[in-house]
Image (cartoon, rainbow, N blue to C red):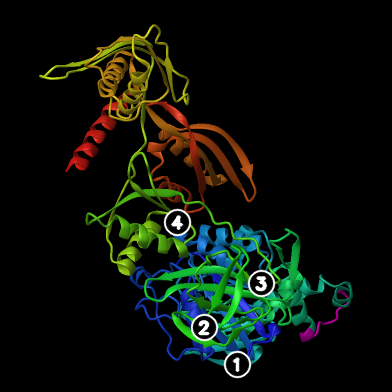
Amino acid sequence: MANLEVDKIRNVAVIAHGGAGKTTLVEAMLFDSNSIDRFGNVGDGTTTTDYEPEEIARKITITSSLAFCNWNGYRINLIDTPGFINFIEDVRGCLRAVDGAIVIVSAISGVKAETEKIWKYACEYEVPRIVFINKMDKDTANFSMAIGELEKSFETEAIPLQIPIGAGDSFVGIVDLIKMKAYKFNNGKAEEFDMPSDPELVSGLSEAEGYRKKLVEKIAESDDVLLERYLEGGELTDDEIIKGIREGSLTRRFIPVTCGSAIKNIAVPQLLDSVLLCLPSPSEMHRISPIKGKNPKDGKEVERKPAKTEPLSAYVFKTMADPYTGRLSMFRVYSGILKADSNVLNATRDAKERIGQVFYLMGKKQVPAQSIGPGEIGVVAKLKETYTGDTLSEEHHPIVFEKVKFADPIISYAIAPKSKGDEEKVSAGLSRILEEDSTLRFQRDDETKEMLLSGMGQVHLEVTLERLKRKFGVEVVMKTPKIPYRETIKTSTKVQGKYKKQSGGRGQYGDCYIEIEPLPRGGGFEFIDKIVGGAIPRQYIPAVEKGIVEAMQEGVIAGYPIVDLRVTLYDGSYHSVDSSEMAFKIAGSMAIKKAVQDARPVLLEPIMKVGVITPDDTLGAVIGDLNSKRGRVQGVEPQAGGNQKIMAIVPMAEMLTYANQLHSLTSGRGLYSMEFSHYEEVPGHLIQKITVEREAQKKEKAE
């Protein structure tokens, strides 16, 4: 396939909250453009873009997927994106690769929290948008309600290009406000009417004329000449209206709105027409937001134009890992041509890559290509050094584009293989999955000896483990992670630690006197040697310290490490024959255990610094919830968009499942971040519970 002309390309992400109908709409667009010959269904798992087993089972989009169609001589590259809150960060990476977006708003549920979130992502990348009000065929569908929510939530003017004919069971089509034509649909086929010619449409004529007047006025406002003519009673030509709609959309002065039903395939062809009209080509997007990166050799800014004659530059916006086909890298070519069987430079990592075959993707189907030109989106397999966020370029004209910054994980669980000995298989499989999901983290906790998997929510982690089982054949169990409690002391004390053993032959003798005293929180451990006069030979003093340090790994209350104390070794005795390093190590261990018992030991818990962003209307509920978690609110700051940021310190033990709770309290609109702050003493009424849990953990480990 020859490379496409840049002006004939539209790169479009379909974005919305979960359940709005993104996948069904993409399916309808592919079907109406004859890109597929069967209209798949989400319910029975036959759609082009939801093909992963986890997506089919849950009936939600989990990972973004690519498809393309040809419409009226244009190529439209489509990215079907997730809308469920646990997977919504994937949208951020995809918006980096497109020039426009279709935002779906439900005619029955309106704008949801997830819609607001992805709208902000689109604003970050200055992506022009059009809105498709879906589900006009459903009971309680309300077009004007959806328009009102759009304008209120996004603080921008929504200008309908179409209005619905009817709603719910009576929804049969749309009125095109540009042409002032009506389109009625039957089994996906449209019949065109002049507005007054159909008796059923006469009653809606005044409504259509009112919306058209608003459309024309908005376009006239953008040009003094047009405005003067319009105010003097003149009409705008169709060409002037079309030009005004395009300019208004590309500059984001207003949001064009369309409507229909994806599931019934009503008004989808008109939406495709609107994509061509309202969303930019790669070259137009370059004029709006020029393509710039940095030369990795000198750090200077470099610009690339979306032209075949420019040096190659391509950004890898998504990676898919498969145990059989290897790594698939999805990329957007910004300039030049990426050819099959060629060599390129990964400028991000300064590594050379061999390009084998390149493809377009239609869901999971790979369509071979000889090359991928400027403005196009493609896929290449089995790159060795390339990951999400990397830039590919010509070796002699390197450029690095800024990486997308994904949000940090918000929830962590401990995982363990069901079969003993599978730890390495778990690590190997998860490392491959992490290549394709930038919001996952996997690490081993040196203290608790647990494998920790962190992600954007519980469902996110559950899906990850389902993939681990399906792709890499290893099953794991998921548990709440252990809290890294600590123990310390509150007073000073002096004790003797004496180890004496005689059982025939050479014996064991070690004797030491230590003083322990508390250090300020975070003070760690200090060891002071005050031995004088050879009470303990110099070669045995390190052994005393080693015995103390090892014994401090298991405290006297619940077996947690002991911290924040100073130990002074000030006296002792030895035996010229029976003393040894081992004897003094045991003596040191005995001394510290006895001393801690006598120095009012206490249990400490980690305290987290938490920042919660919540809408105004849920501020009180969120603060009340934090207070119930033994949290202490430090302050509240107003944020943009009618939000508030709460700063608080909260015990880690109370925050393990906070992601789910905050989602429930704020209907998915809340966000939070968390980092370690310090340790504090555990309230007395909780110590017994923690001690019992610790004993259970030890028993489980022993088994």
Q: Which label's residue is closer to the chain start, 2 or 1?
A: 1
Q: Label 2 crowding class (10 Å Cα cut-off): few <14, some 14-19, many 20+?
A: some
Q: Main secondary structure of the magenta part?
A: loop
Q: Amino acid at mark 1?
A: Glu
Does the magenta run of residues contain 413?
A: no
Callouts 3 and 2 close, C-beta under 8 Å: no
Read off the magenta span. Answer: 231-239
* Number of the label disc, if any, that sits on residue 440: 4
Query: Percent position (x, y) of residue 250?
Result: 72, 72
In the rendered image, which quarter is residue 600 located in?
top left
Q: CA distance from mark 1 to mark 4?
A: 50 Å
Q: Which label's residue is closer to the chain start, 1 or 3?
A: 1
Q: CA distance from mark 2 to mark 1?
A: 45 Å
According to the picture, the residue beneath numbered tag 3 turns out to be 395
On screen, residue 183 versus residue 555, left or right, reads right
Q: Which label's residue is closer to the chain start, 1 or 4?
A: 1
Which residue corresponds to the image point at 63% horizontal and 42% vertical from the top-left? Answer: 638
According to the picture, the residue beneath numbered tag 1 turns out to be 192
According to the picture, the residue beneath numbered tag 2 turns out to be 357
Q: CA distance from mark 1 to mark 3?
A: 55 Å
Residue most toward the left? Answer: 504
Query: Percent position (x, y) of residue 593?
Result: 28, 20
Residue nearer the viewer, 416 or 655: 416
Closer to the eye: label 2 or 1: 2
Q: CA distance from mark 4 to mark 3?
A: 32 Å
Is 568 above or below relative to 263?
Answer: above
Closer to the eye: label 4 or 3: 3
Which residue corresponds to the image point at 68% horizontal and 81% vertical from the top-left? Answer: 277
Describe the element under mark 4 as helix, strand or loop.
Answer: loop
Q: Label 3 crowding class (10 Å Cα cut-off): few <14, some 14-19, many 20+?
A: some
